[in-house]
Amino acid sequence: MDLSYFDNSVINLEVLAEEAAEVIQAKSKIIRFGFNEQNCKRLETEIGDFLALVDILLDEKLISSNGLQEAKKAKLEKLVNYY
């Protein structure tokens, strides 16, 4: 498949989506099979892969560190109020 018409940003967004799906899959395995060392390590690995793509998107200036921090803070506030 010729990907020459894609720029790096498009490809990196696609890889980000793939990594997000792998985080979801690792989470599902924990729910189905339990919190064991292997499953937790896989989740950790997949989250690390996802964060690597976040760093790439930051480097490309597609997203900003300030924007991420604001979103994170807002989410934590919602979770505190939810629980």
Image (cartoon, helix red, strand yellow):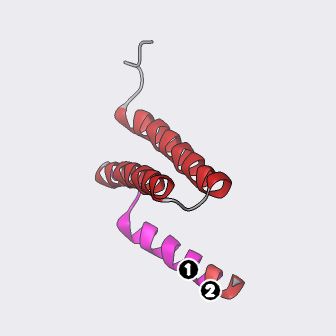
Residue drawn at x 45%, y 38% is 15
- In percent of width and height, residue 82 lies at 71, 82
2 vs 59, left or right, is right
How many marks do you count on the picture? 2
Residue drawn at x 38%, y 54% is 48
Which one is in front, 26 or 32? 32
Q: Of the numbered discs in the image, which one, if any, rests on residue 10?
A: none
28 vs 37, left or right, is right
- In percent of width and height, residue 61 lies at 34, 53
Residue at the outermost right position: 82
Q: Which residue is mark 2?
A: 80
Residue drawn at x 46%, y 41% is 13
Which one is in front, 46 or 75? 46
* Element carrying mark 2: helix
- In percent of width and height, residue 77 lies at 59, 84
Tell me if residue 67 is in the magenta stretch. Answer: yes
Q: Which residues are magenta?
A: 61-78
Task: Identify the amino acid type marked 2.
Answer: Val
The quadrant the N terminus occupies is: top left
Residue at the outermost bottom position: 81
Residue drawn at x 52%, y 71% is 71
Cβ atoms under marks 1 and 2 closer than 8 Å:
yes
**Is 63 placed above or below 16 here?**
below
Residue at the outermost left position: 59
Q: Residues within 10 Å of mark 1 (few under 14, many from 20)?
A: few
* Element carrying mark 1: helix
The quadrant the C terminus occupies is: bottom right
Task: Identify the amino acid type marked 1.
Answer: Leu
Q: Which residue is mark 1?
A: 76
